[in-house]
């Protein structure tokens, strides 16, 4: 019975790794499409979302099956609970990448010329991509220190989002003919900020997995008591 449980958990790990890779690719391509902008790349991100959703459902079903058939306890139970939570966050990140891609397409459709002043997302995009990669690495290595460092980066992403929105609002007043572009820019920035939030949630799940501590709505200063 124990051997079968370990086999199913190993299979679950592979499935989650595959989902994480797909979501990371979606985010990378969505932000690249928004930066260029590139309508074809944005459309490709949207087209692959169904596969991400299907994998998320399959992983959830596998977790529920393991819980029902094996009734795991202690570390095994904590791992399955963590995977259920991370699985949900990854699907949300995939949806946010799709939202970015859709606003990229919308911006391209409504913007027939270069806007008077362009919004620069490069710093925010780089931070969010770095957060996601490090959070997924921390999940694999179960590294609480790395997870905590990623959580600290979220405040910087929030601050940049606020700056982008304030700048976009000012530019709407200054260049009302480009209002559609700046509205899309605000949505893109907001979705990037939400990806940062979801990534932070994954890091909180890593800490729960390794230490059994729930740090939601708080910040962990050290990885152990």
Image: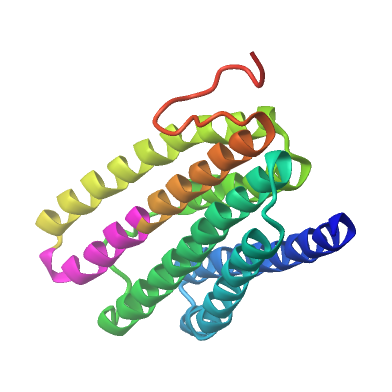
Q: Main secondary structure of the magenta part?
A: helix
Q: Residue furthest top?
A: 225
Where, quadrant-wise, is the C terminus in this rendering? top right
> How many numbered tags mark residues here?
0
Residue, x 34% and y 59% (percent of image)? 118
Q: Nearer the viewer, residue 10 or 147?
A: 10
Along the line of sight, the residue nearer the viewer: 18 or 4: 4
Is residue 152 rendered magenta in the image? Answer: no
Q: Position of residue 81 (x, y in %)?
A: 59, 50
Q: Is residue 161 above or below residue 121?
A: above
Q: Measuring from the top left, give residue 1's x and y in whole percent.
A: 85, 59
Q: Position of residue 170 (x, y in %)?
A: 16, 49
Q: How is the image coloured?
A: rainbow
In the image, residue 115 lies at what x, y percent?
28, 68
Q: Nearer the viewer, residue 195 or 57?
A: 57
Q: Give the quadrant of residue 224.
A: top right
Residue beneath the point at 24% across and 62% down: 182
Q: Residue at x 54, y 37 (%)?
A: 204
Q: In the figure, residue 150 lies in which quadrant?
A: top right
**Does 161 appear above or below 51?**
above
Q: Which residues are magenta?
A: 176-190
* Most foreground residue, 128 or 85: 85
């Amino acid at each position: 019975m124990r051997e079968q449980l370990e086999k199913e958990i190993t299979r679950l790990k592979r499935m989650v790794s595959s989902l994480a890779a797909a979501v990371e690719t979606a985010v990378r391509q969505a932000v690249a499409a928004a930066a260029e902008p590139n309508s074809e790349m944005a459309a490709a991100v949207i087209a692959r979302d169904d596969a991400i959703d299907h994998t998320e459902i399959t992983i959830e079903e596998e977790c529920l099956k393991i819980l029902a058939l094996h009734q795991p306890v202690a570390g095994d139970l904590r791992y399955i609970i963590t995977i259920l939570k991370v699985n949900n966050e990854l699907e949300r990140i995939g949806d946010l990448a799709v939202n970015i891609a859709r606003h990229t397409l919308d911006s391209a459709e409504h913007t027939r010329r270069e806007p008077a002043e362009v919004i620069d997302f490069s710093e925010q995009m780089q931070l969010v991509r770095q957060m996601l990669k490090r959070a997924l690495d921390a999940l694999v290595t179960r590294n609480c220190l790395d997870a905590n460092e990623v959580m600290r980066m979220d405040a910087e992403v929030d601050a940049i989002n606020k700056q982008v929105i304030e700048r976009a609002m000012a530019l709407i007043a200054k260049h009302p003919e480009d209002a559609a572009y700046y509205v899309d820019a605000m949505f893109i920035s907001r979705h990037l900020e939400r990806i940062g939030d979801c990534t932070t949630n994954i890091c909180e799940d890593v800490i729960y997995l390794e230490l059994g501590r729930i740090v939601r709505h708080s910040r962990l200063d050290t990885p152990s008591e």
